[in-house]
Amino acid sequence: MRTFLVTGGAGFIGSNFVHHVIEHTDDNVVVLDKLTYAGNRASLEGLPEDRVRLVVGDIADAAVVDPLVADADAVVHYAAESH
Protein backbone atom coordinates (compact mmCIF):
# COMPACT_ATOMS: atom_id res chain seq x y z
CA MET A 1 0.00 0.00 0.00
CA ARG A 2 1.39 3.37 -1.05
CA THR A 3 0.79 6.85 0.28
CA PHE A 4 0.22 9.68 -2.17
CA LEU A 5 0.69 13.32 -1.20
CA VAL A 6 -1.68 15.33 -3.39
CA THR A 7 -1.15 19.08 -3.37
CA GLY A 8 -4.27 21.00 -4.30
CA GLY A 9 -6.28 17.88 -3.58
CA ALA A 10 -9.39 19.81 -2.53
CA GLY A 11 -9.65 21.56 -5.89
CA PHE A 12 -11.60 20.29 -8.89
CA ILE A 13 -8.89 18.26 -10.60
CA GLY A 14 -7.08 17.23 -7.43
CA SER A 15 -10.19 15.96 -5.68
CA ASN A 16 -11.20 13.92 -8.73
CA PHE A 17 -7.76 12.31 -8.66
CA VAL A 18 -8.15 11.56 -4.94
CA HIS A 19 -11.54 9.94 -5.54
CA HIS A 20 -10.04 7.87 -8.37
CA VAL A 21 -7.18 6.60 -6.19
CA ILE A 22 -9.52 5.66 -3.36
CA GLU A 23 -12.02 3.92 -5.66
CA HIS A 24 -9.46 1.96 -7.68
CA THR A 25 -6.60 1.14 -5.29
CA ASP A 26 -5.96 0.30 -1.66
CA ASP A 27 -3.56 3.26 -1.35
CA ASN A 28 -3.76 6.12 1.14
CA VAL A 29 -3.86 9.81 0.29
CA VAL A 30 -2.71 12.89 2.18
CA VAL A 31 -4.23 16.04 0.70
CA LEU A 32 -2.35 19.29 1.21
CA ASP A 33 -4.51 22.26 0.31
CA LYS A 34 -4.55 25.93 1.30
CA LEU A 35 -8.36 25.98 0.91
CA THR A 36 -8.49 29.33 -0.85
CA TYR A 37 -11.18 30.17 -3.42
CA ALA A 38 -10.47 27.02 -5.49
CA GLY A 39 -10.22 24.46 -2.70
CA ASN A 40 -13.32 23.05 -1.08
CA ARG A 41 -13.42 20.68 1.87
CA ALA A 42 -16.74 19.35 0.57
CA SER A 43 -14.93 17.89 -2.46
CA LEU A 44 -13.49 15.24 -0.15
CA GLU A 45 -16.70 14.37 1.68
CA GLY A 46 -17.65 10.72 1.77
CA LEU A 47 -14.08 9.48 1.45
CA PRO A 48 -12.87 7.03 4.10
CA GLU A 49 -11.19 8.88 6.96
CA ASP A 50 -8.83 5.97 7.55
CA ARG A 51 -7.38 6.40 4.03
CA VAL A 52 -7.64 10.14 3.33
CA ARG A 53 -6.21 12.91 5.49
CA LEU A 54 -6.60 16.63 4.80
CA VAL A 55 -3.79 18.95 5.85
CA VAL A 56 -4.65 22.63 5.50
CA GLY A 57 -1.46 24.44 4.59
CA ASP A 58 0.60 26.21 1.96
CA ILE A 59 2.99 24.43 -0.39
CA ALA A 60 5.40 27.33 0.19
CA ASP A 61 5.71 26.42 3.89
CA ALA A 62 8.64 24.02 4.17
CA ALA A 63 7.81 23.21 7.80
CA VAL A 64 4.49 21.77 6.62
CA VAL A 65 5.63 20.25 3.32
CA ASP A 66 8.91 18.56 4.28
CA PRO A 67 7.51 15.95 6.71
CA LEU A 68 4.61 15.18 4.36
CA VAL A 69 6.98 14.57 1.45
CA ALA A 70 9.24 12.44 3.65
CA ASP A 71 6.32 10.15 4.51
CA ALA A 72 4.93 9.92 0.95
CA ASP A 73 5.72 7.35 -1.70
CA ALA A 74 4.71 9.77 -4.45
CA VAL A 75 3.79 13.43 -4.77
CA VAL A 76 1.09 14.51 -7.21
CA HIS A 77 1.10 18.28 -7.67
CA TYR A 78 -2.17 20.01 -8.55
CA ALA A 79 -1.84 23.12 -6.35
CA ALA A 80 -2.08 26.36 -8.33
CA GLU A 81 -3.41 29.89 -8.11
CA SER A 82 -4.75 31.06 -11.44
CA HIS A 83 -5.97 34.51 -10.39
Image: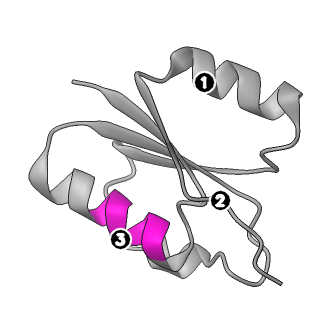
Magenta stretch encompasses residue 15: yes
How busy is the neighbourhood of tag 3: few (under 14 within 10 Å), some, or many (20 plus)?
A: some
Mark 3 vs mark 1, CA separation in Å = 21 Å
Q: Residue at x 70, y 65 (%)?
A: 80
Where residue 48 appears, as percent x and y from the top left, is 31, 55
Residue 81 in which image quadrant: bottom right
Give the extent of the magenta segment: 13-19
Q: Amino acid at mark 1?
A: Val
Which quarter shows the C terminus? bottom right
The label on residue 69 is 1
Residue picked out by circle 2? 79
Tag 1 secondary structure = helix
Magenta stretch encompasses residue 82: no
Where residue 1 appears, as percent x and y from the top left, is 21, 24
Where residue 67 appears, as percent x and y from the top left, is 69, 20
Tag 3 secondary structure = helix
Q: Amino acid at mark 3?
A: Asn
| Left or right placement of residue 67 versus residue 23 in this view | right
Magenta residues, dominant SS class: helix
Q: Nearer the viewer, residue 63 or 79?
A: 79
Mark 1 vs mark 2, CA separation in Å = 15 Å
Residue picked out by circle 3? 16
Name which of mark 2 and mark 3 comes first in the sequence.
3
Q: Residue at x 15, y 59 (%)?
A: 23
Where residue 47 appears, as percent x and y from the top left, is 33, 63
Regarding residue 47, the answer to whether it shows in the image is: no
